[in-house]
Image: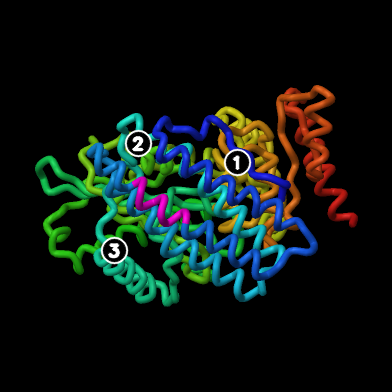
Amino acid sequence: MGNRLVWDERYNIGVEIIDREHKKLFGILGKLFDFGNRAEKSHFACQEAIKYFKDHAIQHFSDEEAYMDSIDYPGLRAHRRIHKDFRERMLPALESELEMTGFSATSIHHFLGVCAGWLIAHTMIEDHMIVSGEPVMHWENLLPEEEQAMMGQTVASILHSMFRLNPQLISNYYAGEQFGRGICCRLVYSDGEKKSWEFLLLFEEQLVGSIIGNAVSSKSETTAMMLSNVASYAATQLVERVRRYFPSLKPLVLKEEQILTYEQFYRMYERLSPQFSFLFDTGKGYFAYCMAASHMPLSGDGITAVAKDAVAALESRLRLDDPLPHPCPDSAVEAEADRRKILVVDDSDFMRRAMLDLLGRDYEVLTADSSMSAIRSITLARPDLVLLDYEMPVCNGGQMLEMIRSEKEFADIPVIFLTCRVDRASVEKAISLKPEGYLSKSLSAESVKREIDRFFEKRERR
């Protein structure tokens, strides 16, 4: 990690009691960053410093919530839930790792990377909403934990009975991030009046493939359509079974079912405020289940299987979601399965789309629009290469690279910086962080593609 975590004035929200505590927390982590790089570090001193940070963070959460309560902040309930998740789930898990590894350098760096990343993101996003008066919309409608647990167990049980899988609920705060190649389904149910419920389900393609089994042996347009329709059918059946367990859902009638591109899925997810948002590891691939009461009009996005132009629409969706030419010959099946996976991290939607179009024919391309989203994508999909925007806001490319390197499991994932800066000082600063490479965004598309191809060719020769 770097020698210091430096306070940035952008983190100030304009409330003295909160800004003062934020600076103190950053200061504690900054000293730990510095201390963690010393060879003569003391196990006991690390324990005490981390305990001090934890105690301070918990007290800060309490003070911050009291302030929000005093000004009748509408996002207090959601904010409390975010604090509670960090306090009761994330911190204990990190502490357990520290104890199990004897406070190894790697586990200390992991603790610091995760806590600093969380603190920066939380300060810049949720805490700034306190002074703007804007509530934290993302999680404000999540139902109480007892109901979360009941729904999570129900969905896991249905997945087991439908597909003979042993799913594990790994998050009930799924944030819509992409994991591998996915098939996205949207179902809209209505009570015939104004209220409707939306279900967004995302199946990792390999999970749907495991359902089909050996029914097909080649990748073709027919196979792709089969996977999409199996996912659509499975989504409908799963939601129908969920409805049997919850009386309030039984009177609803299915009004619309769609297959979405991931971009459409994410746009819809952002507009919703989910009551449930789960991510499962089924052992055969990931599965996300999101559910929200909705008053939005039915959308024209996506593809409805019974639509008049369903075939043309589905073909269009496949072209958007899967840039590979169809059909591909049987001899290419193994090569396709072994395609290198590239994660593009950039806050520019234009750059993410440009890199997807440029690289999607030869590589499996995932995208992330922030450092926190990138960490989740790396955890879920483990790419073979990360193309990382060097000038991202909040947590820049250098900090992001340090976070990746601090996690033992991800430390060997190669990272290439993408940057608009080509002056000598900026180049030297980026190179000093020792990425695998450095690409200017001003290069032609052909040059960028050629450099990426060369990178993988060199690794294969090694």
N-terminal-most mark, 2 or 1: 2
Write down the quadrant of residue 295 in the picture. top left
Of helix, strand and loop, which one carries label 1?
loop
The percent position of residue 86, horizontal first and vertical second, equals 44, 57
Determine contact: label 3, label 1, CB under 8 Å.
no
Q: Is residue 88 left or right of residue 400?
A: left
Chief SS of the magenta region: helix
Q: Identify the residue under disc 1.
A: 323
Q: CA distance from mark 2 to mark 3?
A: 24 Å
| Residue type for callout 3 | Glu
Name, please, the residue furthest toward the right: 461
Magenta part of the chain: 56-64
Rendered image: mark on residue 53: none
Q: Which residue is nearer to you in this view: 349 or 312?
A: 349
Q: Is residue 59 magenta?
A: yes
Q: Identify the residue under disc 2.
A: 130
Callout 1: 10 Å neighbours few (<14), some, many (20+)?
some
Taking the spot 89% from the left edge, 57% from the top edge, the residue there is 462
The percent position of residue 391, horizontal first and vertical second, equals 65, 31
Q: CA distance from mark 3 to mark 1?
A: 41 Å
Taking the spot 83% from the left edge, 32% from the top edge, the residue there is 428
Task: Establish if 132 lies above or below 207.
Answer: above
Task: Establish if 52 lies above or below 184.
Answer: below
Viewer-nearest of labels 3 and 1? 3
Q: Which residue is nearer to you in this view: 325 or 413?
A: 413
N-terminal-most mark, 3 or 1: 3
Determine contact: label 2, label 1, CB under 8 Å.
no
Q: Which residue is nearer to you in this view: 137 or 344?
A: 137
Q: CA distance from mark 2 to mark 1?
A: 42 Å
Q: Is residue 286 left or right of residue 160?
A: right
| Residue type for callout 1 | Pro
Any part of residue 352 in sight: no
